[in-house]
Image (spheres, helix red, strand yellow):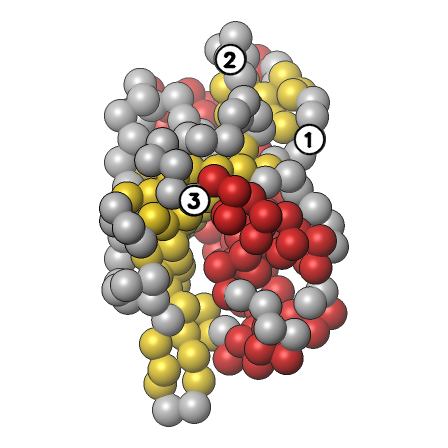
Amino acid sequence: MKFNSINRDKWDRKEYFEHYLQQQTTFSLTNEINITILMKNLKKKNYKLYPAFIFIVTKIVNAHREFRMNFNSEGNLGYWTEICPLYTIFDKMTHTFSGIWSPNLSIFSEFHAQYENDEERYNGTGRLFPKTPIPDNTIPISMIPWSSFTAFNLNINNGGDFLLPIITGGKYSQVNDELFLPVSLQMHHAVCDGYHAGVFMNDLQRLADESADWI
């Protein structure tokens, strides 16, 4: 894990960054991802959708520097060389959740096994963050499997300095013979624009369509 500082005075995005950071402008985009092929490939090997969702989101984030930009603990602007997923797991007994993290693994079968081990170990603890210490280079991912949605917005009142994207999935639905998963992406306009949101969604659909290559 390495944090690379950005020289704001020489950064080609300086004007955009300072303008939208001062305004504390964030935006969200929700899209329906066709997961028909993905679900067929997952079922062939008895894999779960949620860890697959976490895996491909993490893969996309690590492929684009804009999605790894943030302030570090010392208040410096920069980007992480690698991001790990920090995701929620649901406690069926108390109807609460915990946020846990898993390492970024490039092979899906290994990540799926790690996810299942972490989910089993830390579920039911009654704690918000049972797996500590939490690395600084994590990105928030969650899923609301009880309801579909056409829009979702999560507000963080953190002085406007949380720059990482926030990704939320919903309950997938069936339309004719196809399955669609609503995915909400929230971004800080200081580091990402509509173009980057489009890149994220297009990559997400591509990885779902090409899931036979990585499952």
Res 37 seen here = no
Q: Residue at x 43, y 90 (%)?
A: 177
> 192 or 48, which is in the foreground?
48
**Vertical placement of 52 versus 8: above or below?**
below
The quarter of the displayed image where residue 68 is located: top right
Badge 1 density bin: few <14, some 14–19, many ≥20, Cα 10 Å: some
Mark 2 vs 1: CB contact within 8 A: no
Q: Amino acid at mark 3?
A: Asn
Nearer the viewer's eye, disc 3 or disc 2? 3
- Taking the image as shown, residue 196 lies to the left or right of residue 168, namely right
Spot occupied by residue 2 in the image (x, y as percentages of width and height): 69, 22
> 150 or 129, which is in the foreground?
129
Q: Amino acid at mark 2?
A: Ser
Q: Residue at x 34, y 48 (%)?
A: 91
Q: Residue at x 61, y 36 (%)?
A: 83
> 193 or 155, which is in the foreground?
155
| Number of numbered tags placed on the structure image | 3
Q: Earlier in the sequence, mark 3 or mark 1?
A: 1
Q: Residue at x 69, y 26 (%)?
A: 1
Spot occupied by residue 201 in the image (x, y as percentages of width and height): 49, 59
Spot occupied by residue 53 in the image (x, y as percentages of width and height): 52, 58
Q: Secondary structure under badge 2?
A: loop
| Mark drawn on residue 81 | 1
Badge 2 density bin: few <14, some 14–19, many ≥20, Cα 10 Å: few
Q: Secondary structure under badge 1?
A: loop
